[in-house]
Image: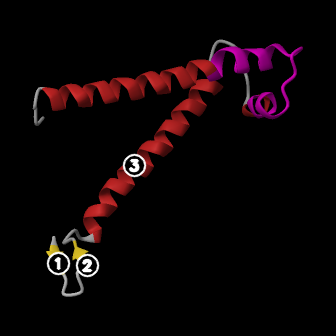
Amino acid sequence: MTKHASGKIHTNISKSRLVIPMIILLGGTVFLILSIAISILYGAADINLQTIWQSITNFDSNSTSHQIIIGLRIPRALAAALIGAALAVSGSLMQGMTRNPL
């Protein structure tokens, strides 16, 4: 960091160093959304993408497919994402506590 004559502090971090983490973050977000969608789409019951969209936007309690999607698949996918995030945070905390540079 350098201090300019006007009193502003400038960092010497180039924009190219910020691009790679942003690409990784964006790629991870896209992968997370795709994996949640695939988890909702595939299962023992054969349910297509249109039925999933209809169950989210216009839920019909008489439809077994809609009940499967809303009652089982979406909660399972969201729980898996939250549990994965919790495991990632706990692993990061353990690395920091033990000062393991890995």
x then y, percent, for residue 67 = 77, 15
Give the class, few, some or many, for how many residues have Cα within 10 Å of label 1's Cα (few <14, many ≥20): few
Q: Earlier in the sequence, mark 2 or mark 3?
A: 2
- Report the colour scheme: secondary structure
Give the class, few, some or many, for how many residues have Cα within 10 Å of label 2's Cα (few <14, many ≥20): few
**Residue 65, quarter of picture:** top right
Q: Earlier in the sequence, mark 3 or mark 1?
A: 1
Taking the image as drawn, is residue 46 in sight? no
The kind of secondary structure the magenta stretch mainly shows is: helix
Look at the image and say whether residue 59 sits in the magenta stretch. yes
Label 3, on which residue? Answer: 25
x then y, percent, for residue 38 = 58, 30
Residue 62, above or below 16: above
Question: If the image is split into quadrants, where does the N terminus sit?
Answer: bottom left
Q: Does dot 1 land on a helix, a strand or a loop?
A: strand
Residue type of the residue flagged with mark 3: Leu
Kindly identify which numbered label has been placed on residue 3: 1
Q: Does dot 3 land on a helix, a strand or a loop?
A: helix
Q: Are marks 1 and 2 in contact (CB under 8 Å)?
A: yes
Q: Which residues are magenta?
A: 52-74
Residue type of the residue flagged with mark 2: Lys
Q: Does dot 2 land on a helix, a strand or a loop?
A: loop
